[in-house]
Amino acid sequence: MVEDLWLNPWLPVMALATSMVAALVIFMLPEERHVLRTALNLGAAVAKLILVIVMVWGVFHGLEYQLSFTMLPGIEFELKADSLSMMFAGLSSVLWLLTTAYAVGYLENSPNRSRFFGFFSLCVASTTGIALAGNLFTFFLFYEMLTLSTYPLVVHRGTATALRAGRSYIIYTLSGGAVLLLGMAWLYAETGTLDFAPGGVVEGSPTPALTAIFVLLVAGLGVKAALFPLHGWLPQAMVAPAPVSALLHAVAVVKAGAFGIVRVISDVFGIGFASEAGLLLPLAGLAAFTIIFGSVRALFQQDLKRRLAYSTISQVSYIILGICLAGPLGMVGGLVHLLHQGIMKITLFFCAGNYAETLGVHRIDELDGAGPRMPATSVAFTIAAFGMIGTPPLAGFITKWTLGLGALEAELPWVVVVLLASSLLNAAYFLPIVYRLWFRPRSDAWPEEVRWGRLETLGWLLWPPVLTAAAVVMIGVFAAMPFSPLSWAELVVNREYRP
Amino acid sequence: MMAWLMAGLLFTPLAWAALSLLADFRAGWRLAWFGMALQATVAVLLWLAIAQEGGFYYPLGGWSAPLGIELRVDGLAVTFILMTATVATACGLHAGFYLDPDKPWQRYFWPLFWFLWAGLNGVWLGADLFNLYVGLELISLSAVGLVALGGAADALRASLRYLLAALVGSLFYLLGVALVYGQFGTLSLGGVAQLAGEHTGLPGAGLALALMLAGLALKTALFPLHGWLPPAHGIAPSPVSALLSALVLKASFYIAARLWLELGEPQGSYGVAQLMGGLGALAVLWGSWLACLQPRLKQVVAYSSVAQIGYLFLLFPLTWQVSEQVSQQAQQGMTLQVISHALAKAAMFLAAGNLILSTGSSRVADLAGVGRFLPFSLFSFGLAGVSLMSLPPSGGFAAKWLLLQASLASGQWWWALVLVAGGLLSAAYVFRIYRASFQEASGQDDFHHPPRRLEAIPMALALLSLGLGLAGDQVLSVMGLPFEEGS
Amino acid sequence: MTPDLFYAFTGLVLFITGLFGIIALQHLLRKLLAFNLMGSGTFLMLVGLAQHRNGTDPVVQALVLTGIVVAIAATALALVLIRRYYHLAGRVSLERDATDEGRP
């Protein structure tokens, strides 16, 4: 099964093509063809998941799937499936399947669905491309494509607020892209290569030019990763429909930024070079500040999705902080959080969407008594919230524990303090919600209640959060099993660190 | 074989122009099908021939210079010939479906169209300065005629303004030619370059170069000489706007670039190079800024041309006294920018024409709600916009990347900032259109579906400009060593 | 100063006069005449400079003939457009009035 088949180089292309072709076909479909569209969406998602699973199996057994051709003199378009890229590709393909199912239910009976699902698929295609990019140039290509394909999703509703959010989103992300381009062009002018390679491609001693390039690259990527002070677009963008928020926060956009920073630090500069040049400690400081800042701001949000948005700002910086610890354990912690945060946050957004769609509830103080009314959704929400806080044995605990060990290994005790403070803050903004869900009685009627037969809400909306909540428990409990996020992160670090 | 191809390239358009003068619009349209197929075939065949055998000189009708007309065919020329064939065929097809055949003055469309095409091919192939002048004038006069086809008083005003600017530009160029001939006694580009290399610092030659560049800058609508462009391109019928922005502007720029690459090194100076680059940079910033303010869709696209042309002029500082490699990068970047802008801008104007047909209004604000109705032309417009914003994988991005590399490698980092800022500014006006179309309109929709074939043409062009970046290496390898070859 | 150089110099004066006219004058016909003046100046310079250097030169004669044909074509086109414009707009200058839209 893992031999060198002729098909192998084409697997990354096929993984990319599944969602790309789906997007094109969906754009062509007339608005009324709901069943065909749903079938296409789900079929493409399943096909992609299978391809990714095959590649994960192969990469585990030491294969690399690679395909490249020359785009410009000296510049290659390269798709490569290595252990790190499979991590992100796996996350995006699993969550795409669930989010698609969720979106089908969420957008039932709303207009412009061909447009929505077309761009939705394009967005996932870009994410897959980002994951599989074999050099910085290819990464940039898909990074900008992601910007373009998410804009129509953010402004999907076409209201004034949505358009304003879209504008701020596009100003932030395109400026970030421009800065990234400048850094990339300069990097190429300095080093003559844009390849990703374990241990980095930058050689020689640190120079001011290399420092400036690093700052440009991280600033460009930091916009999407919502690193302070470049986070302004994220809370605004939560006006988008819930599946889009789920996608933006958990799978695609912020993760693309964080993943890019991981790539730049580990595969372009190399952790050794970057930490010797003193580039990582300031970034770690910034990430730590963002963690605390996001959590504090989240405390004061009364809108549920806004609170979740600030929580994302805080949580994504764990990934960056982990990499910046410049040690194997820290890196494992950061990488594993790439997956854990995705699964936990998507659960929370699914649940927030369910409350909004079924009960018409958007604000936290309207949630009183929602637990008994929607038990499955609320259990999922509670699990994910406890996961975020870092309660053992859930996914978030694994992250924080590993990060803490990494900090001690790197002899940076202040990071442990940041982790503890952040956990306290997480508890401070999640526990009141959980309390309201379960322990406050409902006195008046729901703002806009919709009944969907026997279930508490539409099946399409109910199962995705239930499944992801189950996953939050499983990946925490079975963290030591092979192919769990933790062991895969360890595999990545082993290959990156000790090639 | 080669002789037939060359003859086909220049004489088919002229013959078709003469023939369609005798026909009405519909007959000219049927005639045009055949002519366009012929031209496209010839262009492809010539391209294949050059790809295998390299460039050559071709004396027309067996008469050699100086009395005869000598043509120079190299990789760059044939690449532009192919580009012209692609864009002109697309615009011709679109025009055949788009223009109203019952308006009496439309019958002049086809003769003017073919004269324009002949002039363009003449400029790409011209080997001496005077023939280039004749080609330029042929282009300008037919372009002015095409703008006037709009028929209304505003169209005539725009075309008159365009005509005056074009004529003054041509005369400046011709005055420069007179000085060159007085100085060197030859008009062949290769001969002048050789002589100019031997006698550096001749004041007459420097002045001649300055005059020619000024005239060509006026015809290319370089900032601050761009005032004539937006009214003319904005008011012309959409297929005509597409031809003008995509091809006509490039002809005068092509001559300026060839002059600079042949004569710039001996006769130019750091100041001239930086001045041209600086004006280009200002064009990028000012053109994009004004594009953001235009209330009318086609005016937005027209001002975007002013901005995109500005990028091309970065060629001047990036090829002056730099290493061979940097100069090469800059020339490749320029070529890709020319091609991708031609494809993208043609697609954009044609798509804008479709959008105007469909909404019945030329205002950006009236696009509200159209996103629900007409994703197809809007999609073409959007894809062309990707190339204008120079986002990957478009040809515009490939061009920008090469220019960025050239400016960083030659230490002129300020042009890199211009390139990046220009990309952001163009995003501002492109997203303005997207945003307007995503807006949900209240009240009744009143949109019409343009025919599918009208919508397919801009989509094809937009996809080509988007895919150009992926095939950049192949295009550049056939283009070979631009300009230098065979001179 | 040889007569040839004198032609060239006169040509320069004509060119500059014409350029001034085309910028400063409002009436379209005057602008067109100024353009023709510029053209004549250019042709004089072309012949004068070439003959100053090389003696009588058939090549420039041929060039100027071609140039005159081009100038006639341009003038004819301009006249047609001006006439039509006058017919439609009732004006003989390009100044914009209040009904004009868009910016120049």
Image (cartoon, rainbow, N blue to C red):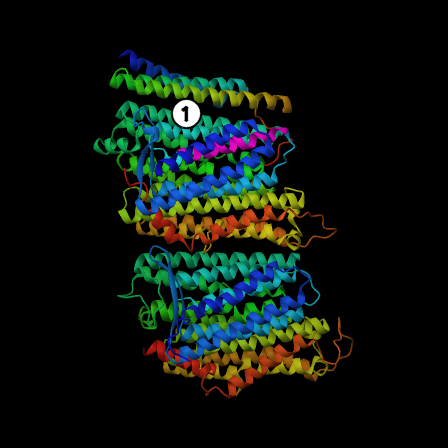
Locate residue A443 relative to residue A141 in the image: left or right.
right
Q: Residue at x 51, y 68 (%)?
A: A254
Above or below, comparing residue B130 to residue B314 in the picture: above
Q: Which residues lie in the magenta part?
A: B104-122
Above or below, comparing residue A43 to residue C37 in the picture: below
Location of the C terminus of chain B (image quadrant): top left
Label 1: how many Cα within 10 Å (few below 14, some 14–19, many 20+) = many
Viewer-nearest residue: B123 or A183: B123
| Residue A297 x/y as whole percent | 56, 70
Above or below, comparing residue B119 to residue A402 in the picture: above
Q: Residue at x 72, y 73 (%)?
A: A359
> Under tag 1, what secondary structure?
helix
Q: Residue at x 41, y 30 (%)?
A: B135
Locate residue C35 relative to residue A238 in the image: left or right.
left
User: Is C53 included in the stretch rendered in magenta?
Assistant: no
Viewer-nearest residue: B7 or B130: B7
The amino acid type found where label 1 is placed reads Leu
Is residue B146 visible to us here? yes
Viewer-nearest residue: A141 or C24: A141
Circle 1 is placed at which residue position?
A: B171
| Residue C46 x/y as whole percent | 34, 20
| Residue B308 x/y as whole percent | 46, 44
